[in-house]
Image (tube, grey):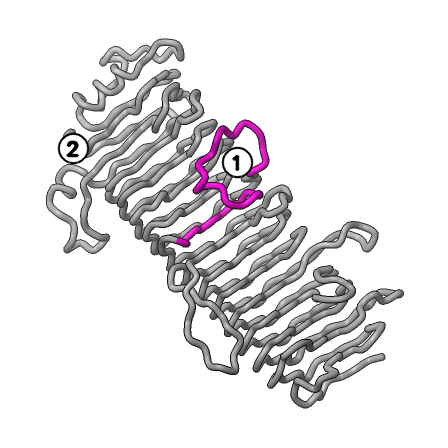
Amino acid sequence: MSNVFGFGAVGDGITDDTESLQHAIDSGDGVVRLNKGTYRITKPLVLDLTKTGFGTVRGEGGSSRIVMAGAGPAIRVIGDHRGTASPGTVQPHTWNKERFPTINGIEIVGDHPNAVGIELRKTMKCVISQVLVRRCRIGVHLVERNRDFVLTDSHLYDNHEIGLLFDRCNLHQTIVHGCHISWNKVAGIKSLGGDIHNLQIVGNDIEYNNATAGNRSQPRADLVEHPGGSEIWFDATDGVISEVTISGNTIQATVQTGGANIRVVGTDVQRPQPADTPKAQKSDTAHLINITGNVLGSQWRAVELRNVSRVTITGNTIYDSADLSLFAAHSAGIVVSGNTFAWRGLDSEPTKDGLRFEDCDNVLLSGLSTQRFCAGSVERGAAVTFVRCSDCGISDCQLLDPLHRGLELEDCVRCRVANNTIVDRRSQSTMRHAIRILGQSRDNLIIGNILSGATDKLLDDSRGTSGPHENLLIR
């Protein structure tokens, strides 16, 4: 193990230790130990595994700090892995010289507006653990191609743009676990383009990643397309993301107009549709995503889906979404089941929250517990709104005390609304309709629901666009 003091490093936070640390990396035994101290550097420390062989940077926890006073990453790890995660594709030079680079036990602090914490390029089985990165432009930055990456037990905190960025990267088999990713100014975790598969984000605290917060300097235009920040943001408009699990996390923020706890955006792909079906755009670029067992809240929207397919949202607790808990557009194969939605406010407070689906196909809502949803207006919209959707099902849900109406279907075809309870239990009811069917809707089935408390009509289907109404209507 190379002690960096033996290579001339001072670690006093004043001396430029760049050359000494790089010398330790290039000339040591592959394991660089950062003793207690603050190491100020002005250029990236490069672990070029293709030249030096396998490498490890190891610190003493909170007592080992790197201050990056120049542009670029404090630590850049370069490999030459060209295969996949399959053993048969891994070339001998990867196993013999480049495998399993590790970085642990250090703090990296940015002291330049374009400083980056750690950059990985063409690595295989890299592990970053027990690392704190703060005040950098990007905390951990993956580019080009990487495989089997693990980020664990670390803090990506108060960075100017992104905590963890997959930047137009070919990346498979990634685990992010046990981390605190917060107070970054654009997003906590973001994927931008690239080819991302097999991503697990499990057991983290991801919060307060606020685009409107201070000290962000001229962010890249392709990183900021929405006025509000996102805790998790997958942008596959010119790439692919699939096989994703987001589970067991706390994901929350301060409310910003346009923000989202989880935002997934795919590429518009127009599919031929039967002549009698509303046009629904489906995406092949963002799909196979599982969002389960999380606590999400205190944002403009909890989950926003655009041009995605095959997404499961189950078993989450979602609260205090200022606009909507879930918004989906031009998406297909969406299952939302067993979630609880709650607004803790009073009728006298600003209205908030609801679910809305536009131009979607094959959506299933079931077993949802909602209370005091306020989405829509007196004239149009509801706590749960479907617009131009086809072949959707809403069953066994509790839509309690909605402000204007419980459920509205507009220009929807072959949708089934069954076995729900939609009631306004206020002493002075404000719900105008429990269910309303509008526009060119047809061939829908409304059956087996309990409806109560409407000031106008419990079931408003004046054009007779739905099937038999075998519902319990309580005046």
Q: Residue at x 85, y 72 (%)?
A: 455
Q: Amino acid at mark 2?
A: Gly
Q: Is residue 130 left or right of residue 362?
A: left
Residue underneath mark 1:
185
Q: Decide which of 349, 6 is in the foreground and name it.
A: 349
Q: Could you say where residue 31 lies in the image, as x and y percent from the top left?
A: 23, 27
State whether residue 106 appears in this view: yes
Q: Are discs 1 and 2 less than 8 Å apart at CB?
A: no
How far from the left and from the top, in percent, is residue 146? 27, 45
Question: From this viewpoint, which residue is outermost toward the left?
Answer: 92
Disc 2 packing (10 Å; few <14; some 14–19; many ≥20): many
40 in relation to 59, above or below: above
Numbered disc in front, either 1 or 2: 1
Which residue is at the front of the view, 308 or 101?
A: 308
**The N terminus - image quarter:** top left
Helix, strand, or loop for circle 1? loop
* 20 left or right, relative to 176: left
Residue type at numbered disc 1: Lys
Q: Position of residue 436 (x, y in %)?
A: 72, 75
Magenta stretch: includes residue 42: no
Give residue 245's quadrant in the image: bottom left
Q: Residue furthest front?
A: 275
Residue 424, quarter of the rendered image: bottom right
**What range is drawn magenta here?**
211-237
How many discs mark residues in the rendered view? 2
Magenta span: chief secondary structure: loop
- Say which mark, if any, is on residue 53: 2
The residue depicted at 44 percent of the width and 20 percent of the height is 111
Local secondary structure at mark 2:
loop
Horizontal relation, residue 397 to residue 120: left or right: right
Question: CA–CA distance between discs 1 and 2?
Answer: 36 Å
